[in-house]
Image (tube, rainbow, N blue to C red):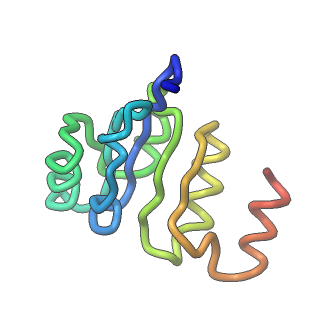
Amino acid sequence: MLATKKIRIGIVGGRFGASFQFHEHPNCIVEAVSDLREDRRSHLKKTYSCDKAYNALDLLLKDPNIDAVFLATPASDHAKHTLASLKAGKHVLCAVPLGMTIQECREIKRLF
């Protein structure tokens, strides 16, 4: 059964983030992509047929049209990117590991 509202997702991370099929799911729209590097942003835009791109996560998180983010950033950034995304009111799908330490994971659990 198809949902009545499609989830608008932001893809963050131009290497690993380009290897998924979010754009093929009938209940998902890739609203925007993000990477610090222009070449990786271009690759994400092409992969997901998406015209909207941001050169930083904090800019993508300000986009009111994005419901959720997929964080495919370096593992050492997962905890801080997850916290920033949750604080911005976005749903989060994060590549593993969630954090590099037990303390980072506890911080996420404690806050959310």
Tell me if residue 3 comes above or below residue 17 in the rendering. above
Residue name at image x 49 percent, y 40 percent: 61
On the image, the x and y values in percent for residue 50 come to: 22, 37
Q: Nearer the viewer, residue 44 or 5?
A: 5
Drawn side of residue 85 relative to residue 22, left or right? right
Using the rendered image of the protein, determine whether residue 59 is visible from the camera's viewpoint. yes
Q: Quadrant of residue 36?
A: bottom left
On the image, the x and y values in percent for residue 55 come to: 30, 50
Drawn side of residue 91 relative to residue 59, left or right? right
Residue name at image x 81 percent, y 54 percent: 111
On the image, the x and y values in percent for residue 26 come to: 38, 32
Residue name at image x 23 percent, y 52 percent: 44
Q: Nearer the viewer, residue 98 or 84?
A: 98
Tell me if residue 50 comes above or below residue 12 in the rendering. above
Residue name at image x 27 percent, y 42 percent: 53
In the displayed image of the protein, which residue is found farthest to the front?
1
Q: Quadrant of residue 23?
A: top left
Q: Quadrant of residue 87?
A: top right
